[in-house]
Amino acid sequence: MCSANLTRIEEFRQLKKEVRGSENHLIVGVDIAKEKHYAFCGTANGRSLLRRLIFNNDKDGFEKLVKTAEAISSRELLPNLIFGVEPTADYHKPLSEYLIGKGFSVVLVANGAVKHNRELLDGRWDKNDTKDSANIADLISQGKFLYYDYPSAQIRDLRNLLSLKQKVKCQEHSIRMRIRNHLVGQFFPELDRFYGSRDSENLAIVKWCLDPEKIAVMDFREFVQLVSGRDGGPVQQERLYSIQESARKSIGCVAGKSVAFEAKMLVIQLVTLRKSIMELEAEIHEVSSKLPGYPSVISIPGVGPVIAAVILAAIGDPQRFTSSKQVLKLAGLDLSANRSGKNAANVTAKLSKKGNAGLRYSLYQAALIASYRNKYFVEYYTRILSGREKERGIKTKMRVKLAAKILVTAWSLMKSGKMFDGKYLLATEVR
């Protein structure tokens, strides 16, 4: 952990304790937009010093904000400056990075908190940029703000790559579904029965001969050479023969030139995207494997290179968390329940699911693998399942609990720099 991040975390924790009712803090709430930002300056005890400051989303605008805030701070004898932003897409990041680079305290207010606090300002639900910036400042004065995570360059690179991979995977899935549900389902529906295997052959059929009439009149050897280009043995021969026989009896719609063009274009895009995903995964592995916590995280059973990268990117700096409860909230694996007016014993707590969904999914996959293949996790999973085997859905619930255990273990190992030891897992108390 670098000294700059450690200093920012300590300043944030101290700020949480001191900001309410403080006479030493100037709070600057900034409503983020694409081209122009709106800022509000006030004190922690509710005094407004500048209701509206409009500045452009460029260096001159950022300097205008800083100079104005410093002038008010000097005039009003408020030595401590706090800048608060609401995350609006990625538009808040250049301003926040600029302010952090200048040594200012930057905090984050949650979108949900901004929404619920808006009506409390004046009893009205109307929304405008000036009011939103005042709303952000009001939340900061109440101490309702979050730490603005600005990790190392390596972690930022890893997060960018994982975000890009998620977008590319969505595009890949969209094209794959377009091919299968639109093209195959409309023009050669019988091919769908063979779609579970030999993906490359299926794509070749879609690309070169989606029209069943074309397949039906084609010589079988020519058909095999076109979609495969190699002799795959009797299993392949039987499969392709069945596809050709299905083509002769197909009920598919008449396929025109536009269909052939679309099929060829979509297959080319799909193959290109899959190649990009492979390159992305290689780049992600290269970046994540150089991080200090990688050997510790990868030593956990069930955690492979991909899941390790997701965990490292989500946790970032392990020292910014003071307890395992905070780490579980990061993934939305913390328990929540509505106990108002009810007997707590009769209320079943559920996962909040307010955190990182991608991290939560990856952890469950790791727990699923570990509960089958690692002796320590198999024994631990059996212990927490003991006596409850007949409960509906209990196996999934216990694997979620195991996923939470993996996350906390990864965080602990990242802090200590140690490797996974199954003896400590079995020594923990089962609850």
Image (tube, rainbow, N blue to C red):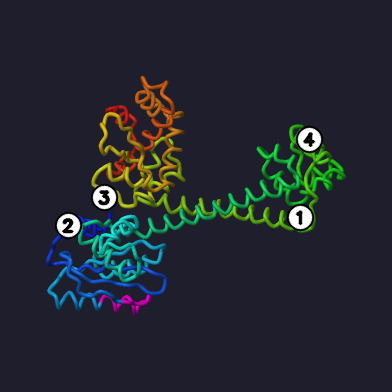
Which quadrant would residue 427 be assigned to in this image?
Answer: top left
Q: Residue at x 45, y 33 (%)?
A: 368
Please state the horizontal and vertical placement of residue 329, each as a whole percent of the image. Answer: 32, 45
Instruction: Point out the tag, 1 or 4, that comes first from the N-terminus.
Output: 4
Alpha-carbon neighbours of circle 1 within 10 Å: few (<14), some, or many (≥20)?
Answer: some
Q: Is residue 121 magenta?
A: no
Instruction: Point out the tag, 1 or 2, that comes first from the N-terminus.
Output: 2
Q: Nearer the viewer, mark 1 or mark 3?
A: 1
Going by the numbered disc 4, the residue's amino acid type is Ser
The reply, left or right, for residue 298 in relation to residue 317 is right
Determine which residue is flagged by label 4.
242
Alpha-carbon neighbours of circle 4 within 10 Å: few (<14), some, or many (≥20)?
Answer: few
Going by the numbered disc 1, the residue's amino acid type is Ala
Which quadrant would residue 3 be assigned to in this image?
Answer: bottom left
Q: Is residue 332 visible?
A: yes
Q: Is residue 296 visible?
A: no
Determine which residue is flagged by label 3.
319
Label ID, residue 14: 2
Distance in Å between CA atoms under marks 1 and 4: 22 Å
Q: Nearer the viewer, mark 2 or mark 3?
A: 2
Q: Residue at x 36, y 19 (%)?
A: 387
Going by the numbered disc 2, the residue's amino acid type is Gln
Going by the numbered disc 3, the residue's amino acid type is Gln
Alpha-carbon neighbours of circle 2 within 10 Å: few (<14), some, or many (≥20)?
Answer: few
